Image: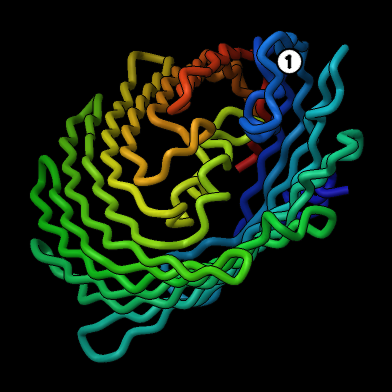
Amino acid sequence: MIWLTPLVWAADPAVTSQVDLRVGARTQPEAALEQPAEWEPTEELEPAAIGILSAQVGNTPERGPWWQVSGSAWGLAPESETSLLTLTPQAGTGTSLGGWRSDVAARADLQLYPVEESDPSSLRGEVLASLQRPDDRWVPWLGIEGIGRVYPLQPTWSFQSVEPRAELIYRRDAGWVRGRAGAQANQHQGAVGTQVRAGLSAGLTGARAELWGGYGLIAAQAGTDATTARPPFTPIGDYAADADALSAGGFLQHRLDLGTSMFLGDWTLRASGLVRLRDSFTADPTSFARTGHGQLDLERPLGGVWVGVATLGVSGAALEGGAGYTDTYGWVGISWRPN
């Protein structure tokens, strides 16, 4: 089992490892699992208690080959449909070519729902190749990313996408600015969609705090409108990037992100927020018009290799047809970090 792996590798100083155990609750655990078209107007999504066991182990040097494996087990009660097992191996390598650096990386994400009858279990593969020219101030970056996701028991949900993009980063001692632009093509149920993507982000770095924010724009065309019902958040409360992978009959989307990290004595505080506004070109009442997410994380050393952790978050979504939900979640726990 993956959470035992760090115990084996902890003796190797080149390998880092971590194990977390957390308990908490969520008010709407099924909202991120069900498709909006499956919601019943009179059905109330029930809250649930959560137990989380997660771990990761890896060797990630700045140069040369690297690898990492992470996994988790999420148990919910009394509604156990969204209980989840995950396994994520990833690896890559980087080389220098004159003044340029090239990187190749791949990862696989296995999500297994052992209880859910409709079985949204899936296997997701991702490959990224990039080329950049490191510099003290200006860093140009070119890359291409391919994604494929397969739902063995729900093959109509499976899709593929490819995205070439370019970025330009400007760095100063106290901050950075990144601009990016790219194009994307996606395939689902035999229909092909395209997207044009652009974004701008910036950050400030101080001795005890960091602040960053960003704006992203997606203009999508064609594709099958059946994909508009894909949930925008994962069952663990994170924003699901795959919700933007399909053109869904066409849409114009704006996304705003904001986050900060603060180091207050022994405490580390991280906060982040996200707002996504989408204007769909289809008249599907189950397509998402607005989504939002906010999360606060706290950490404090407890002595030795132990760290206390706590999380509080909220995710929400509103559909074109007026339906929606708000999911509040939180957990506390302990983290083992021998490195």
The percent position of residue 282, horizontal first and vertical second, equals: 41, 44
Left or right of 121: which side holds 238? Answer: left
Is the C terminus in the top left, top right, bottom left or bottom right quadrant? top right
Dot 1: what SS? strand
Residue shown at the point (66%, 14%) measured from the top left: 41
Q: Is residue 310 visible?
A: yes
Residue shown at the point (20%, 29%) measured from the top left: 207
Residue shown at the point (30%, 28%) measured from the top left: 259
Which sits in the foreground, 137 or 124?
Answer: 124
- Vertical placement of 123 versus 146: above or below? above
Which sits in the foreground, 250 or 8?
Answer: 250
Instruction: Bin the neighbour count of mark 1 within 10 Å (Cα to Cα): few under 14, some 14-19, many 20 and up.
Output: some
Q: Is residue 107 visible?
A: no
| Residue farthest bottom in this picture | 98
Which sits in the foreground, 186 or 165?
Answer: 186
Quadrant of residue 189 within the rendered picture: bottom right
Q: How is the image coloured?
A: rainbow
Left or right of 12: which side holds 170? Answer: left
The percent position of residue 136, horizontal first and vertical second, equals: 11, 63
The percent position of residue 312, horizontal first and vertical second, equals: 52, 13
**Residue type for callout 1:** Val
Residue to which mark 1 is pinned: 23
| Residue farthest front in this picture | 283
The percent position of residue 218, horizontal first and vertical second, equals: 29, 52
